[in-house]
Amino acid sequence: MAKRCLSPEHNLSDQTRISLLDNRLANQIAAGEVVERPASVVKELLENSIDAGASRIEVDVERGGARLIRITDNGRGIHKDDMGLALTRHATSKISKTEDLGCIQTLGFRGEALASISAVSRLTLTSRTRDSELAWQASAQGRDMAVDIQPAAASPGTRIEVADLFFNTPARQKFLRTEKTEFNHIEEVFKRQALANFSIAFMLKHNHKIAKRVPACAEPAQYLKRIATICGQQFVDSAIEFKCQHEVVKISGWLGKPSFHRSESDIQYVFINGRPVKDKTLNHAVRQAYEGLLPPGRMATYIIYLNVDASQVDVNVHPTKHEVRFSEQRLVHDLLAKSVSDALSEQVEFVEAIYPESSAISVQEGVDELSAVETSESSLTARRQSRHALYQTPKDGGNLETFDYIKSVINTTSHLNDRSSKVSQPSVSEPTQKMVTGGARHSDEAGATPVAKTTAVNDSDLVPLTGDYYLLRLENECFFADAIRLLRYFISNLLEGDLIAKNRALLFPQSIELSQSLLEDAQTHDLLVKLGFEVQPADAEQIQIRKIPSWLAPFGNQLIFDCLAEWLITGSQNNDALVEAIINQLTECGPLPEATLGVLSGVAGNKLHLDKLTSRGAMRAVTSQNMSTIFNMDK
Ligand SMILES: Nc1ncnc2c1ncn2[C@@H]1O[C@H](COP(=O)(O)OP(=O)(O)O)[C@@H](O)[C@H]1O
Ligand SMILES: [Mg+2]
């Protein structure tokens, strides 16, 4: 076999001797790793232009890139004396010592691309630095790839022309697909870079026609326009922008709502420090966050940017640099899954608890579902803003805003000690207010003086303090609230049937396995309904969940489905144990999600519950007395 492939000048005795490969052959072998098809050339050349600080890059291809690929940029150019080195393997301006490998800031660093591409095509490099009057043109010739340099005319920047790719490597040429397929791959590479570099203007031409053109984005407001050009207006219309900062990684981007799913994974982009990657771990994290929200076999859509310290990520894993390795792989995976999951769950409709048989009076009455959701989103935003404002203050000396706020409330409440004087005036005119409804049958139980049926709770009146503690303003009264105790109270009331949880339908009902004994237990069904689920038997060992409680939804379906069987086993023994089991599991994943807090503050805002919550230590009125205790503590 080996014998048949040998060239005629080889004889058998040559096989046992070692000789140095000529430059071209060595480069062609190296090209095998990085230059798989025309799109790989475009990828390498785009990376070089971006590394050169270009603000405008034009990509021109003919016949799917097999005939010609020309990339022109206005970057810093290459010095005449370096033109030869640029085409030489293992020559780079991007790293110079071993330590640099641990902290790579550029897209390229291997010093291989130009040499490899030039070994398998007819490559011409034309470049002019800004301080040079002349441009220079270089190409590598012959088996030793000697570089010939000639003066040329060109604007500052670099132009690289790659003609007749694989003309001298027929084995590779055979693998080229149709012009359309090859161009699609090029377009994909182009899109990735366009999404990673908003400040650069890009243009892509195929057979002299413009295929894509995106101007430079001077400010973030223009990003969506570019995203629409690259990913389509439908994605933009469905996109949820998200941003979060963790200790090791900053994550941001746009997530397609679960309702915008696709048959292909063609709108799934992940970037690490501006480098497009196809990383299995990161993709898994995103898939996990979307789990249960998409129909079977359908794909989520997203553009996600991760920023980590360059020393925490190794890009030298694969020659194409598509895969990366993090020093804290698991942590980054989990943070990404949580960030995406949180951003998606903030989109669930805003939820509240209702009372059985209540004579609900609501300022929202008559609004259609859509505007109700919009209201809930705007109130969520308002609450987020108030939280944001709170976090802005520390450099001015701690949570001053909170204290000012508390003081202002104390001033107001001191004039308003008669609670009954204000409950009858819910401020119905404010559109962002949500009504928490109260039923008359509970007034006896609450042992309260006659109260109005409803109390308005403005969502923006829930101010985070520290840990699980919040400041809750109810009309003119102000309370410190312990979110965990509120939750405990809420779940107990659900289990006792004093509250009914609202629920929402799953887009795709989910089946979960339960043991035969649990399935047959009537109490199981009762518990599920009380918690707010709607279920029906699926088969001998499964139940199908059709609706999930709105207060639990923000925790993500996966957590709920994972825990449900355990909760049911606990709950069949004892209600109190079930309450604790649920709280333990929910608080294990971090702070309570805002939508759930909204439900709790709604319950707390009801006059019927206020007294009970206060007596159980879940709420404490902010009074002049306990404030002076706080402020006089150090005196
Ligand atoms: N478009 C360009 N603008 C300026 N310099 C370039 C450009 N393309 C390549 N170079 C120079 O040529 C060198 C070799 O490029 P390449 O073979 O792609 O290796 P690498 O990018 O890994 O350094 C680069 O280090 C850079 O100095
Ligand atoms: Mg390069």
Image (tube, helix red, strand yellow):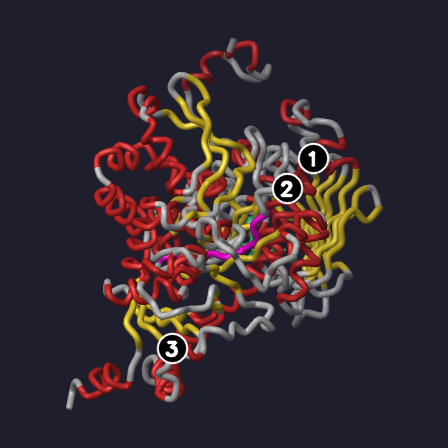
Tell me if 491 is positioned left or right of 629 in this view. right
Residues rendered magenta in the picture: 248-256
Name the spot of residue 55 as percent of width and height, x first.
66, 64
| Residue 52 vertical placement versus 176 (above, below) | below
Between disc 2 and disc 3, whose residue precedes? Answer: 2
Q: Is mark 2 within 8 Å of ligand 1?
A: no
Depth order, front residue of 123/537: 537
- First in residue order: circle 2 vs circle 1: 2
Report if residue 107 is visible in the image. no
Query: 228 above or below 433?
Result: above
**Which sits in the foreground, 303 or 300?**
300
Is label 3 in a helix, a strand or a loop? helix
Residue 160: x and y in percent read: 69, 50
- Asked which secondary structure carries label 2, the reply is helix
Say left or right for 328 vs 345: left
Q: Nearer the viewer, residue 439 or 307?
A: 439
Label 3 or label 1, whichever comes before in sequence order: 1
- Give the x, y percent position of residue 437: 48, 59
Which residue, given by chain and number where applicable, does mark 2 sit on? 41
Residue at which label 1 appears: 165
| Amino acid type of the residue that numbered disc 3 sits on in the rendered structure | Arg
Q: Position of residue 85 (x, y in %)?
A: 55, 52
Q: Is residue 523 magenta?
A: no
Tell me how far mark 2 sits from mark 3, CA to CA.
74 Å
Q: Is mark 1 within 8 Å of ligand 1?
A: no
